[in-house]
């Protein structure tokens, strides 16, 4: 196998039973039984809507970061703007534009796909697409923020310094870590690795609101 052949492969299986074990406010817990090999396997996992994240980079190669409280880990994490794909039928790019405006009061004239990843494929079907947003401008309106977003802190950080913080393990949010390292690598390749903003998203196996198999 050469490096160009290295890729994740779809592996469709026959789901013989699928039930919602617990229905939460945001995500559900699902139990699937599926045929695999000579028998069947039962797995429980978080049934997630998926999400988008945005690395906004200005003309000085500074990344926009936001800091907000995340209760499960009891941390005020540095992150990049992100949000759930919880609106049925909403295009991921439009969702990314909405999140950038709502969380950072910014718009962008140039959008590219930076990276796609699964957050925890052994226990969740959550897929996240990270966009690179450039040619930034202030949004037409400032959005009111509530709950954990009410005290968001915004900071512009040079990409090189952000990569240093990742490598020193001072920041741990997965979307931020992946975005920083991917952007640094893409920049070194003159951005030739970026995808079109409407590029196919293989990891997004079903549309928002669609039932599991």
Image: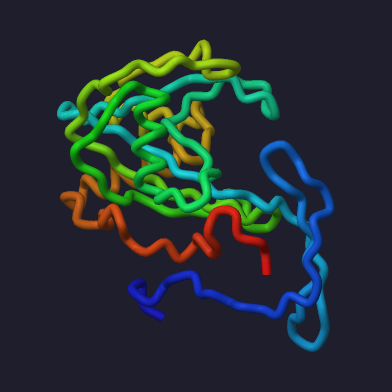
Can you name the residue that lies furthest to the top here? Answer: 151
Q: Is residue 192 left or right of residue 53?
A: left
**Quarter assignment of residue 4:** bottom left
Extreme-front residue of the structure: 89
Give residue 105's position: percent from left, percent from top: 33, 21
Query: If the image is split into quadrants, where does the C terminus sit?
Result: bottom right
Q: Residue at x 38, y 40 (%)?
A: 96
Image-based side of 94 in relation to 117, left or right? left
Residue shown at 40%/51% (left/top)? 91
Q: Quadrant of residue 17?
A: bottom right
* Residue at the image position 62 percent from the left and 25 percent from the top: 70
Residue 10 relative to residue 136: left or right: right
Which residue is drawn at the image coordinates 52% and 18% (left, top)? 149
Percent position of residue 94, x then y = 36, 44
Q: How many numbered circles does the render carry? A: 0
Q: How is the image coloured?
A: rainbow
Residue 159, placed above or below residue 155: below
Q: Residue furthest bottom?
A: 38
- Residue 164 x %, y %: 37, 30
Quadrant into which the N terminus falls: bottom left
Question: Which of the 4 quarters of the picture holds residue 41?
Answer: bottom right
Q: Is residue 12 depicted above or below 98 in this figure?
A: below
Q: Position of residue 127 (x, y in %)?
A: 53, 53
Relative to 69, residue 178 above or below: below
Observer-nearest residue: 68 or 83?
A: 83
Q: Using residue 64 as the reference point, say whether residue 121 is left or right of it.
A: right
């Amino acid at each position: 196998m050469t490096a160009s052949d290295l890729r994740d492969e779809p592996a469709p299986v026959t789901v013989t039973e699928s039930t919602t074990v617990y229905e939460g406010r945001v995500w559900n817990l699902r139990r699937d039984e599926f045929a695999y090999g000579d028998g069947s396997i039962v797995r429980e996992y978080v049934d997630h809507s998926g999400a988008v994240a945005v690395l906004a980079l200005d003309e000085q190669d500074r990344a926009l970061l936001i800091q907000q409280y995340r209760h499960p880990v009891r941390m005020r994490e540095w992150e990049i703007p992100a949000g759930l794909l919880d609106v049925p039928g909403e295009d991921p790019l439009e969702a990314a534009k909405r999140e950038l405006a709502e969380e950072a009061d910014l718009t962008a004239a140039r959008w590219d796909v930076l990276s796609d990843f699964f957050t925890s494929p052994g226990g969740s079907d959550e897929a996240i697409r990270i966009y690179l947003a450039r040619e930034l401008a202030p949004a037409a309106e400032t959005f009111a923020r509530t709950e954990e977003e009410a005290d968001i802190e915004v900071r512009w950080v040079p990409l090189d310094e952000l990569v240093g913080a990742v490598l020193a393990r001072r920041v741990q949010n997965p979307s931020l870590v992946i975005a920083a390292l991917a952007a640094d690598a893409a920049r070194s390749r003159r951005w030739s690795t970026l995808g079109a903003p409407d590029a196919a998203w293989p990891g997004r196996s079903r549309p928002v609101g669609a039932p599991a198999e």
